[in-house]
Image: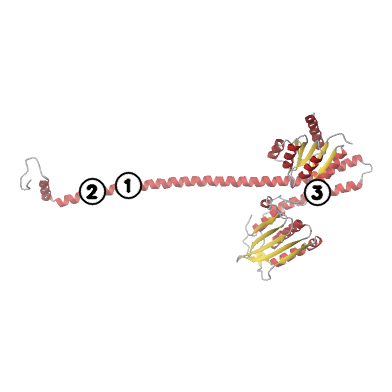
Amino acid sequence: MPTGPTVLLVDDEERFRQNLKKMLTAHGLAVTAVGSGEEALAELARQPYDVMLLDMRMPGLSGLETLAAIKQDYPETEVIVLTGHASVDTAAEIIRLGGFEFLLKPCPLEEIIAKIESAYERSLARKR
Amino acid sequence: MDDSTPPPAGRQSWAGLRRQAADYGSTWLVLFLAVMLAAQVSLLWGLAAATAAGWSFLTVQRLRRERARADQAKCLVDEQLLQSQKLAALGKLSAGLAHEINNPLAIIRQEAEWLLFLCRQSDPLDMTEAISGLRQILKQVDRSREITTNLLNFARRQQPVIQAVDLNRLVADMVRLVAKEVEQRRISVITQAPPDLPVIKSDGPLLRQVILNLLNNAIQAIEQDGTITVVVQRAEPDAVLIQIKDTGCGISKEHLPHIFDPFFTTKPQGKGTGLGLSICHGIIERLGGTISVASEAGKGSTFTVKLPISLTPKEI
């Protein structure tokens, strides 16, 4: 049983989601993957997560809408936004809504893992 | 006082003067005075008229200058507005392009990273997994190429090649092209086209592209079990209408205004580039026509293309 952070991965691109879950799991992380903001909120209602990897552009609830909802109901979950494009405005909005960080796709796996670890540390510090 | 009474010395009565005037030819004097008065009045009127004309001239000049300045300012504002609209469109296009290209790139990167991981970890290498990864890389490269090709088609300023187009035949050809797919999905296609429809002057290959795109969209909107109705009819004296109606998922109210925007798509990731309808829109505009959509979420959509019978090409 992994002792590291529990990660919720939210991305509507199925192959990306499967691959990232497979690679993060291979690095010892406990990952659950879902395909939309709505599913992410349902999953969070079921159990808490330390870190969330959240896609920006999704049908239904957008990344920003999902982020706002999570920060309101589950503030202890740190959110890293993954996006194919981020303008300065979007970046500012992510930070304003309480997002931990944002990463631009395509992003090296090491960078994603490093950000998850930083977010987990902050999550632990917040819980102490 | 009696006129006949002589006035005192050094004083003259009016009557005396009149007499004197009469003596010196009063008619000429009166005439002279009248002429002088008239000249003075004319002079005054002239001066007044000249002043008014001068004032009017200056006012008109001032108004012209102000108008020219206002026109210049308006031109500047229009130009700035156009420029900012262009920049906004370019920004939107770049954002869409970045997103559409970066997603397949992200998958390509993942697959390559996973293959490296497998090469380092597994001995022997899991060939099934490796082949799946390589296939996925090829698929994502094709996806990216499709996006750039569509974008180039979207941006290309191609002059239509005008020729006689039998719309009924063109529509029937395109319906035939999707026949196999609609059959597999149990979708029926009903075509309503009057036999006496005039041959129109337009660009056949470009029109085929539009009709095929609209038919494919209708099929994707229905997915399984439904009806596509294609209506071709004459409209107004010099136009024809092509309507493609589906009983698919429809388009929500908030999506409807963006349906012709480049990179706007309601399809799942990787299933649509969001360029099809914007390309259709560009083509129909180039062909001097219009394209519009009416839709209700959950009930279906109707795309209406209106084309002139005789094309006057215009560049977009």
Q: Is residue B139 above or below residue A67?
A: below
Q: Chain of mark 3?
A: B
Secondary structure of the residue carrying tag 3 is helix
Q: For this rendering, which residue is in front, B285 or B225? A: B225
Q: From this viewpoint, which residue is outermost toward the right?
A: B124
Could you tell whether B314 is left or right of B140 in the image?
Answer: left
Residue B10 horizontal/vertical position (percent): 8, 40
Q: Where on the picture, by quarter, is residue A54?
A: top right
The residue under the point 62% across, 58% down is: B314
Q: Check disc 3 and report the residue beneath it.
A: B140
Q: Check disc 1 and report the residue beneath it.
A: B48
Mark 1–mark 2 distance (CA, rounded to whole Å): 16 Å
Q: Quadrant of the N terminus of chain B?
A: top left
Q: Check disc 2 and report the residue beneath it.
A: B37
Residue B57 horizontal/vertical position (percent): 39, 47
Identified by mark 2, the residue type is Leu
Identified by mark 1, the residue type is Ala
Identified by mark 3, the residue type is Gln
User: Do the dots labelled 3 and 1 sit on one chain?
Assistant: yes
The reply to whether the C-beta atoms of the residues labelled 1 and 2 are less than 8 Å apart is: no
Secondary structure of the residue carrying tag 2 is helix
User: Do the dots labelled 1 and 2 sit on one chain?
Assistant: yes
Residue A6 horizontal/vertical position (percent): 83, 37
